[in-house]
Amino acid sequence: MKFNWTQIAATAVLAGVMLGCGPTEAPAGDAAPADANKTASTQKRPIIGISIPAADHGWTAGVKWWAEKEMKEHPEIEFVLDTAETPDKQTASIDGMMAKKVDALVILATESAPLTPKAQEVHDAGVWIINVDRGFLKPIADVYLQGDNKAFGRISAEYVAKHMGGKGNLLILEGVPCTVNTDRVSAAKEVFAKYPDIKILDSQSANWNQQKAFEVSQALLVKHKLVDAVWAQDDDMALGVEKALKEAGRDKNIWILGGGGMKDIVKRVMDGDVLFPADVTYPPSMIADGIKAAVEAVKTGKKPTRGADFKQKDQIIGIELVEKENAKKFYFPDSIY
């Protein structure tokens, strides 16, 4: 995403002049207004709300880390950052941000469907909305920033099919019910449909959560005695699958493909671990790009308009396959995720 920083700087300077923030002189013989300095010093900073899911797994912890990092880059903005475990809590949190009169809202939804009506309400109130990752069920946001989840599903499935030799028994773990999961799974299944000798034994949700994936995998391994691979779709879930495989004594003949680019998984790919032969990128740093877009919006004074010409601006982040040969490029040992 590329921002016009020259325009932003010019706007900021112009705003400063108009607000009397620069040096001024009182007319000869007249006293300066008693509240002139007070008016300038108490001028309200723009407020940006950031609403994200609670850090219930590594990827969302990475989202929070990147959000806090980006916030530090903009001391001229007042930020309100809040996390929520459930759609109800996130809705209540957003209500609190609206009470503080935020100028823009950056939101990564806990779930797509329950947050869509609230997002509509917020946008109709004139607040700029930057939607990151998990989309709404209709085009409400001014900017929708997302990873290419259809490509994620397609690239994942093509690798799985190739690594399985075009045949065998496969388990699929799904994430939180939202547009991200829908796009990934539907695109993957379109690929798998081209391989009649690959049998999808089960496809169940584990909410991108390591403990949930462990529990779901335990049950699936009892149910299915012949399994060749698991498409876990997420690195946290992949670690839960690994734990279940080891407890069942089946970690020697089943391999896993996760996703997200967790440093621990990338390192194992780099080291040639047969349990994790590859990974797929999906950077949590996308939240920082969402915050940058919101900062630009409030600094340039752009406001959303709800006319017939309204069109949500989609920004797509590319997805890459991580294999042993290129894993070093994606390994960041100092990263939180």
Image: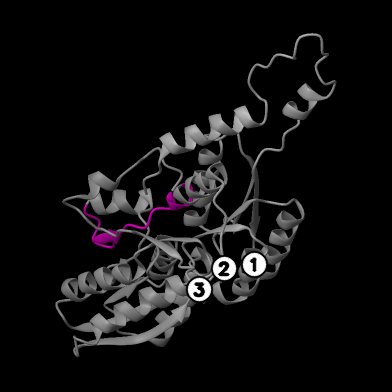
| Residue 75 position (above or below residue 54) | above
Whether residues under marks 1 and 2 lie with C-beta atoms below 8 angstroms apart, the answer is yes
Which residue lies under the disc numbered 1?
A: 124
Which residue lies under the disc numbered 3?
A: 308
* SS label for mark 3: loop
Residue 329 percent across, percent down from the top left: 24, 45
Q: Earlier in the sequence, mark 1 or mark 3?
A: 1
Left or right of 332, for residue 298:
right
Disc 3: CA contacts within 10 A as few (<14), some (14-19) or many (>=20)? few
Q: Does the magenta stretch include residue 194?
A: no
Which residue lies under the disc numbered 2?
A: 306
Q: Which of 135 and 212 is in front in this view?
A: 135
Q: Which amino acid does label 1 sit on?
A: Asp
Residue 189 percent across, percent down from the top left: 30, 82
Principal SS element in the magenta part? loop
* SS label for mark 1: helix
Q: Which amino acid does label 3 sit on?
A: Ala
Q: How far apart are marks 1 and 2 (CA)?
A: 8 Å
* SS label for mark 2: loop
Magenta highlight range: 272-288
